[in-house]
Image (spheres, rainbow, N blue to C red):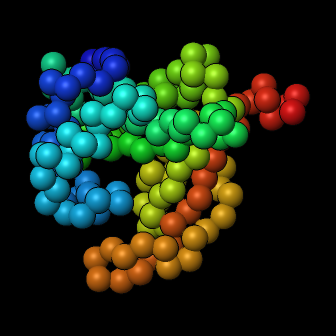
Amino acid sequence: MEISIRHYEKTDNADLFEIYRLPEVTANTSQLPYINSDKVEQLFDNPENYTLVAEVDEKVVGHVTLFLTNKVRDRHAAFLAIAVHPSCHGKGVGRYLMEQAVEQADNWLNLIRLELEVHVDNEVACALYQKVGFETEGIKRLSTFKAGRYIDMVLMSRIRPDYASNG
């Protein structure tokens, strides 16, 4: 399977909707199940965000988004979100997206800190984030409502290595 990474285009919204319409995807996000296509478009069609997509056979099968800020004192940091179509889980798509996002953050966007939140029960995602250099910073207890109950969120971050060792 050949995976290509490129920047998001508006024409990707249909494929991204196909990913986000799946309850098994939205279950691990902050979105409600059965998200509509207008909401998906709003998520991605924002010039302040930096989104990369993964393509397999000319179909978008995942994305990683860096949510950048205009706050002067926070411009060194971005919040990260990722989703991969379940048919591509375990095939390296998520890892490749994360590696490319980190490379862009370090070498082109001049970011020092990447941060994310992940459901405590999403052990596969936690392991992926650790493989690309994220560390657990803490737990937000009873932070989100999922499948009829409150669950914890793991707060994770990655500090650019050259800054962490020299900072």
On the image, the x and y values in percent for residue 30 come to 35, 60
On the image, the x and y values in percent for residue 100 come to 47, 24
Which residue occupies the foreground of this view, 133 or 145? 145
Which residue occupies the foreground of this view, 95 or 144? 144
Which residue occupies the foreground of this view, 84 or 80? 80
Question: Which residue ends up furthest to the right in the rendered image?
Answer: 166
Q: Is residue 166 visible?
A: yes
Which residue occupies the foreground of this view, 6 or 120? 6
Q: Is residue 130 above or below residue 154?
A: above
On the image, the x and y values in percent for residue 12 come to 18, 28
- Where is the C terminus found, in terms of image quarters? top right
The residue shown at (33%, 74%) is 146
Q: Is residue 87 visible?
A: no
The residue shown at (29%, 59%) is 31
- Where is the N terminus found, in terms of image quarters? top left
In the rendered structure, the answer to whether residue 57 lies left or right of residue 27 reads: left
Q: Is residue 22 above or below residue 70?
A: below
The residue shown at (56%, 77%) is 141
Residue 83, by quadrant, is top left
Q: Is residue 145 above or below residue 48?
A: below
In the rendered structure, the answer to whether residue 34 lies left or right of residue 141 reads: left
The residue shown at (29%, 37%) is 44
On the image, the x and y values in percent for residue 66 come to 47, 36
Q: How many numbered tags mark residues here?
A: 0
Residue 46, by quadrant, is top left
